[in-house]
Amino acid sequence: MKIKIITDSNCELSKEYIIENHVHVIPFYFQLGGIEYKDNFGSEVSYKEFYNRLRNGEMSTTTQITPFIFEEIFNEYINEGYDVIYLGFSSALSETFNCAQIARNSILSRNSDANITVFDTRSASSGQGLIVFKVIEMLNMGRTKEEIIDNLKILRMNLNSWFIVDNLEHLKRGGRISATNAAFGKIMEIKPILKLDYEGKIVASDKVRGRKKSIKALFDKFENNAFDNEIQTVFIHHADCLKDAESLKMMITRCNKVKEVIINEMGPIIGSHTGPGSIAIAFLGNQK
């Protein structure tokens, strides 16, 4: 049976990778300057322009993917004879995953033979991208759908997804931290080290002072938690701060023999909530 992998644009994988591996990416939408844009690999608003506009004080808002869109896309592949696996953005951060479930249930109510799995990655950005990457690896190895789903559950438990932000203002706007904490953090140059926990929620792990120390803290998380480094593929995603992402990559490769470190750009959906200068890292490890 043919298997189709579907995800959403919060996986932030490169366009080249998506095309090469025949992954269907459903775009989110965002509003900037009163205009709605599709999150489509920076084709409508480049990542550089997006983050520069945020730096200049513009605000971006995002919208979830509707059940109608999911149902339309799921049906397209079911009608072509595919089994479907949707790897979704964390349900703890958006109602989008629930919309995918609604679409699946709607299709099954009319077609009980449709084979659709909607899987909550409980992650985003680099973490969601790494899960999609690992599933494609399994698919290319000839694994069955059942084997892929079983392995996905283990992957999700071992996924470490950490990130930092450069400016707390965007977390304040999203209700992640209070206005008082944001103001205090700005004055004191406090940088929280954030992670997605086992439920896919954003929680603060540690706090450091200064940008360089926050980047070093991401390296420390890898150094302390990663296992099987020789076969690790590490994902680093950045919000228009490539040099810092490359610095983090260098720290990892200088001290560890890893299979690969992949750097991708952080898209406007996640970037709307974290702001320019954010960096996310994902790898497999002992604890989140």
Image (cartoon, rainbow, N blue to C red):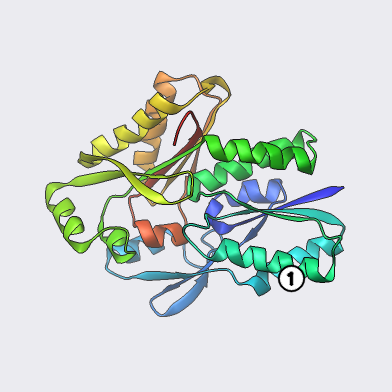
Q: Nearer the viewer, residue 51 or 284?
A: 284
- Which image quarter: residue 146? top right
Counting the numbered discs, the total is 1
Q: Determine whether, in the image, residue 98 is placed left or right of residue 124.
A: right
| Rendering coords of residue 173 (x, y %) | 30, 66
Residue lying at 58% horizontally and 61% vertically, measured from the top left = 97
Quadrant into which the C terminus falls: top left
Instruction: Give the residue type that dot 1 points to.
Output: Ser
Q: Determine whether, in the image, residue 217 is placed left or right of residue 231.
A: left
Q: Residue furthest left?
A: 187
Residue lying at 53% horizontally and 34% vertically, measured from the top left = 158
Q: Nearer the viewer, residue 70 or 149?
A: 149
In the displayed structure, 284 sits above or below 257; it is below
| Rendering coords of residue 281 (x, y %) | 44, 39
Whether residue 27 is visible, yes or no, is no
Q: Residue furthest bottom?
A: 34
Q: Nearer the viewer, residue 219 or 97?
A: 97
The 10 Å Cα crowd at callout 1, few under 14, some 14 to 19, many 20 or more, is some
Q: Determine whether, in the image, residue 261 is placed left or right of residue 249.
A: right
Q: Nearer the viewer, residue 252 or 204?
A: 204
Question: Is label 1 in a helix, a strand or a loop?
Answer: helix
- Which image quarter: residue 148? top right
- Which image quarter: residue 178? bottom left
| Rendering coords of residue 30 (x, y %) | 47, 70
Whether residue 110 is visible, yes or no, is yes
| Rendering coords of residue 95 (x, y %) | 53, 65
Residue behind mark 1: 106
Residue lying at 67% horizontally and 36% vertically, measured from the top left = 151
